[in-house]
Image: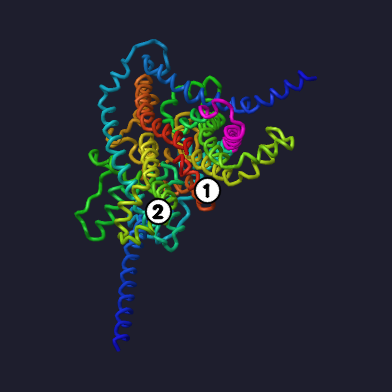
C-alpha cells in the first residue's frame, strides 16, 4: 500500500516535471515564433503589395492578402516603369547587374584562390604582412576611396561603364576572397603539397590538381559571398555610373524615388522583389554556404 | 646548363611572389594610395574637381563648422548605439533560444537570416512602405479600432533616425545570431553538464558561464556591427534619403552629397578621412588581436 502510494506520488512528480518542461518549452517556442513572424512580415508585405491593383492599395490594408491578384505591377516594374526619363522598366538594369556580377565574381574568386594558396603553401618572408594589408581592405569604409577611384576610372577611360564597376568590385573583392581561401587552406595539411612536390609537380600543377579539387566548398562560399555583395552594392553603382549603365539597385532606388503623380506602391514593391530575387534564390538554395561566408568576417568564426 | 637550371629554379622560387604581386599592387594602389590621395584632397580647396593647392586644415575647420555634419555625427552615435545594443541583444537571445534542441531549428535560422541576403535598398524600400503613416502600420492599427494610434516617425524629424534603427536591426540581428550560435556550438558541453550536476539553474549557467565564454563572439559581433553602422549609406538613402530635411543624415551620406551633389570635394574628403579614422580606431586593434592570438594558438 505504502509502496503503491509512493509510486503514485512518483508518477505525479514525473507528470509535474513534464508539465513544467512543457511550460519551459512554451517560453522557448513563443518568442522564436513571434520573431519569425516579425522577420517574415516585410517579405509578406512586399509580395502581397506587389500583387494588388493600385486601388486596393489605397483602399485596403497594407498587410492583408490581395482581393484580386494581378501581375500588372510586376509587368510594369520589369518593362515599363520610368527611371529618370527612360521608361524601360528594370529589365536593362537587371542585365547590367548580371553583366557586372558574373565576371567580377569569377575573377575575384579565382584571384583569391591563388592568393590564399600562395599565402599558406608558398609562404615567403613578409607573407603575414601582405595578408594584413589585404585584410584591412575588407574593413575599408569605401567613402575614403570614392574620389580617387572616380578620378582613376576617368583616367583609364572606364568612367560610368560596366567594365569600370567590374574592376572596382574585383579590386576590393580580392581582400575578402583571399581571406576566405587563406583561412581554408591553412587547415589543409602541408604534406599534401610536399608529396606532390616530391612527385615533381610544380607551382601551378599543385594548385590545379591537388589544391583546387579539395576546395569546392570554399569556392562556393566565396562565389556566394561575392555574388551577394556585388549584386547588392549601391555605393559604387551610384558613384561611378549614371543613366543606362547603372546596376539594378540604383535603378530600383530611382523608381522608388519618383515623386510625380500618384505613387505606385505596387510597382515599387514588385521592383524591390525583382532586385531581391537573385540573392534570395541563392540564399534559399545554398544558405549553409552563405552563413559560412558571413561568419568568416568574424575572422575566427 | 648549370646556369640555366639555377635560373629556372630561382624563377620557380620567385614564382609565388610574382603571381601574388599584381593583386598586392592593385590593393596597395586602390586601398592605401587612394586613402593617401583622399587625405591630400582634404588639405586642398577642391570643389568640383581636385585642385592641388595646400590650404592646411581649412576643410576640416569648415567641416566641423557645418551644422549638417554635426547632425550626421550625432545621428551616427544614436544610430550605432541603438543598432549595436538591439542587434546584439536580440541576436544573443535568439541564438540561446535556438540552441535548446529546437524542432525545425534550421528553418527558423533561415528565416532570421534571410534579410542579410537582401540589398539595403530593398530593405529600405520595404520599410519605407510599412512605416508610411498614411497607408502602413498606422492605418492598419487605426482601422482595427485604436484610432488614436500614430506611428509617423518616418516623417517626424525628431524620430526619423529611429526608423533607420528599426530597419537596420531587422536586417542585421540575424547576423549577430549566426555568430553567437556558432560560438555556442563551440562551447564544450561537459562544462554545462558539470554545472548542472552542481545544481546550478539554467539561467544561472547562462549568466555565469556561457555568456562570459562567448566573449570572442561578442567582440566579433560588436566590431562587425560597428563597421556596418559606420558605413551605412544605402539604407538611409532608400529609407529616408537623409530627410526629412537633414534629420537622418549620417557621415556616409554627408560625404556622398558634399562630394557629388554640393561640389564641396574638399569637405567631402575631410569627412571621409574622419570616417576612416573612426573605423581604423575600431578595426586595427581588433585585427591585431585576432591575428596575434591566432599565431600564438
Is residue B228 depicted above or below B102 in this figure? above
Task: Report which quarter residue A24 is drawn in.
Answer: bottom left
Q: Which mark is residue B276?
A: none
**Label 1 lies in what chain?**
A
Look at the numbered disc 1 and give the secondary structure of its residue: helix
Q: Residue under label 1, please give it.
A: A289
Q: Is residue B119 visible?
A: yes
In screen coordinates, is A99 left or right of B104?
A: right
Above or below for A222 versus B66: below
Question: Label 1: few (<14), some or many (≥20) within 10 Å?
Answer: many
Q: Residue at x 27, y 54 (%)?
A: B139
Instruction: Report how far apart the C-alphas of labels 1 and 2 lie in the structure.
Output: 31 Å
- As drawn, is B293 to the left or to the right of B241? right
Q: Work out which quarter of the rendered image holds the N terminus of chain A and state it.
A: bottom left
The dominant secondary structure in magenta is helix
In the image, which residues are magenta?
A106-130
B42 over A45 or under it: above or below: above
Where does label 2 land, which residue? A49
Q: Residue at x 43, y 55 (%)?
A: B109
Q: Sort mark 2 into few (<14), some (14-19) or many (20+) by Cα contacts within 10 Å.
A: many
Residue found farthest to the top: B53
Amino acid at each position: 500500500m505504502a509502496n503503491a502510494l509512493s509510486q503514485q506520488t512518483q508518477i505525479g512528480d514525473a507528470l509535474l516535471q513534464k508539465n513544467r518542461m512543457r511550460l519551459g518549452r512554451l517560453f522557448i517556442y513563443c518568442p522564436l515564433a513571434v520573431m519569425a513572424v516579425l522577420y517574415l512580415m516585410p517579405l509578406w508585405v512586399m509580395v502581397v503589395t506587389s500583387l494588388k491593383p493600385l486601388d486596393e492599395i489605397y483602399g485596403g490594408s497594407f498587410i492583408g492578402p490581395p482581393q484580386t491578384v494581378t501581375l500588372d505591377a510586376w509587368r510594369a516594374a520589369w518593362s515599363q516603369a520610368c527611371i529618370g526619363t527612360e521608361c524601360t522598366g528594370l529589365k536593362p538594369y537587371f542585365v547590367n547587374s548580371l553583366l557586372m556580377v558574373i565576371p567580377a565574381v569569377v575573377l575575384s574568386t579565382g584571384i583569391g584562390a591563388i592568393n590564399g594558396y600562395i599565402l599558406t603553401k608558398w609562404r615567403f618572408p613578409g607573407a603575414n604582412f601582405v595578408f594584413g594589408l589585404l585584410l584591412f581592405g575588407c574593413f575599408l569604409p569605401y567613402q575614403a576611396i570614392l574620389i580617387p577611384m572616380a578620378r582613376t576610372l576617368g583616367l583609364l577611360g572606364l568612367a560610368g561603364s560596366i567594365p569600370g564597376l567590374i574592376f572596382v568590385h574585383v579590386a576590393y573583392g580580392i581582400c575578402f576572397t583571399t581571406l576566405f581561401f587563406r583561412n581554408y587552406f591553412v587547415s589543409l595539411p602541408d604534406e599534401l603539397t610536399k608529396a606532390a612536390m616530391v612527385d615533381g609537380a610544380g607551382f601551378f600543377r599543385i594548385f590545379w590538381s591537388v589544391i583546387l579539387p579539395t576546395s569546392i566548398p570554399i569556392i562556393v562560399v566565396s562565389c556566394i559571398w561575392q555574388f551577394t555583395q556585388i549584386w547588392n552594392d549601391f555605393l559604387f553603382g551610384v558613384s561611378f555610373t549614371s543613366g543606362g549603365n547603372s546596376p539594378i539597385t540604383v535603378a530600383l532606388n530611382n523608381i522608388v524615388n519618383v515623386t510625380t503623380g500618384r505613387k505606385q506602391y505596387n510597382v515599387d514593391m514588385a521592383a524591390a522583389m525583382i532586385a531581391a530575387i537573385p540573392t534570395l534564390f541563392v540564399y534559399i538554395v545554398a544558405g549553409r554556404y552563405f552563413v559560412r561566408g558571413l561568419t568568416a568576417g568574424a575572422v575566427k568564426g | 646548363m648549370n646556369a640555366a637550371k639555377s635560373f629556372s629554379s630561382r624563377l620557380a622560387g620567385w614564382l609565388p611572389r610574382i603571381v601574388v604581386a599584381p593583386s598586392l599592387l592593385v590593393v596597395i594602389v586602390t586601398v592605401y594610395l587612394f586613402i593617401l590621395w583622399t587625405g591630400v584632397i582634404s588639405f586642398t580647396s577642391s570643389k568640383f574637381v581636385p585642385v592641388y593647392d595646400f590650404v592646411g586644415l581649412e576643410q576640416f575647420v569648415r567641416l566641423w563648422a557645418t551644422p549638417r555634419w554635426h547632425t550626421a555625427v550625432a545621428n551616427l552615435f544614436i544610430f550605432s548605439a541603438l543598432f549595436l545594443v538591439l542587434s546584439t541583444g536580440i541576436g544573443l537571445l535568439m541564438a540561446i533560444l535556438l540552441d535548446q534542441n529546437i524542432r525545425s531549428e534550421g528553418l527558423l535560422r533561415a528565416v532570421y537570416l534571410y534579410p542579410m541576403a537582401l540589398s539595403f535598398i530593398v530593405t529600405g524600400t520595404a520599410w519605407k512602405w510599412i512605416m508610411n503613416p498614411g497607408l502602413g502600420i498606422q492605418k492598419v492599427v487605426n482601422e482595427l479600432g485604436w484610432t488614436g494610434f500614430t506611428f509617423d516617425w518616418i516623417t517626424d524629424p525628431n524620430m526619423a533616425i529611429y526608423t533607420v534603427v528599426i530597419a537596420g536591426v531587422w536586417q542585421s540581428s540575424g547576423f549577430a545570431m549566426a555568430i553567437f550560435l556558432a560560438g555556442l556550438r563551440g562551447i564544450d558541453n561537459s562544462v554545462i553538464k558539470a554545472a548542472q550536476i552542481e545544481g546550478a539553474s539554467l539561467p544561472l549557467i547562462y549568466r555565469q558561464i556561457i555568456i562570459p565564454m562567448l566573449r570572442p563572439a561578442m567582440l566579433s559581433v560588436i566590431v562587425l556591427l560597428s563597421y556596418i553602422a559606420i558605413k551605412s549609406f544605402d539604407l538611409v538613402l532608400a529609407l529616408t534619403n537623409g530627410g526629412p530635411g537633414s534629420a537622418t543624415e549620417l557621415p556616409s551620406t554627408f560625404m556622398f552629397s558634399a562630394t557629388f551633389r554640393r561640389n564641396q570635394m574638399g569637405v567631402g574628403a575631410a569627412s571621409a578621412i574622419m570616417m576612416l579614422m573612426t573605423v581604423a580606431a575600431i578595426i586595427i586593434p581588433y585585427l591585431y588581436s585576432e591575428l596575434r592570438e591566432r599565431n600564438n594558438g
